[in-house]
Amino acid sequence: MTSTLTSVLQQQVENLSQLAQLLEQELHLISARDAEALTSLLEQKAELLEAIQAADRQIEPVYQAEKKSGSLPEEAESLMQSAAQILDECKYKTSVNQKAVEQGQLRLTHLRNLMLEVRAKESLTYDKKGKPNGGRLGSGVSA
């Protein structure tokens, strides 16, 4: 059982390391605004997260059995610490990526607002008294 626990933990550490790499690539793609590559990467990330979840389900019962018997090997403890460190790194990278996406959305909202302002200024007309009158292009004009 001990070899099973260590082998599943080793696989989990590899999965988490791959996730950390994907998160790094994700940040680069967010910055580059490469939507196609980002979509592909997100699919890979979803598959990897499913694999991590499956490994967690495998680890839990074996870990609990080893813990009850009091014979948790040092290698398993070391692997669990490594997994926890990489998981913390992944959480940090996820928060950085989230901030990058939020900043990108703010920039897009700002740009949209600027475009709407320009459009409103372009459609500015004047009424019969010479006062500014926006948004009613051509109203009151008869041919």
Image (tube, rainbow, N blue to C red):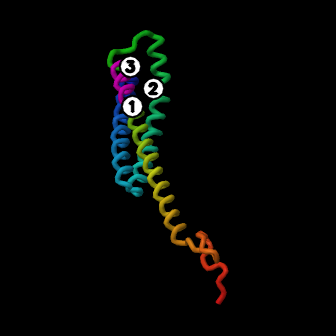
**Circle 3 residue:** 2
Mark 1 closeness class: few <14, some 14–19, many ≥20 residues within 10 Å: many
Image point (43%, 9%), residue name: 70
Q: Which residues are magenta?
A: 77-86
Mark 3 closeness class: few <14, some 14–19, many ≥20 residues within 10 Å: some
**Circle 2 residue:** 59
- What amino acid type should be assigned to the residue bearing mark 2? Ile
- Asked if labels 3 and 1 touch by Cβ distance under 8 angstroms, the answer is no
> Residue most toward the bottom?
143
Residue 7 vertical position relative to residue 45 in the rendered view, above or below: above
Q: Identify the disc placed on residue 12.
A: 1
Residue 73 vertical position relative to residue 117 in the rendered view, above or below: above
- Asked if labels 1 and 2 touch by Cβ distance under 8 angstroms, the answer is yes
x, y percentage for residue 86? 36, 30
Q: Identify the disc placed on residue 124.
A: none
Question: What is the quadrant of the N terminus in the image?
Answer: top left
x, y percentage for residue 7? 36, 27
- What amino acid type should be assigned to the residue bearing mark 1? Gln
Q: Secondary structure at mark 1?
A: helix
Q: How far separated are the C-alphas under marks 3 and 2?
A: 11 Å
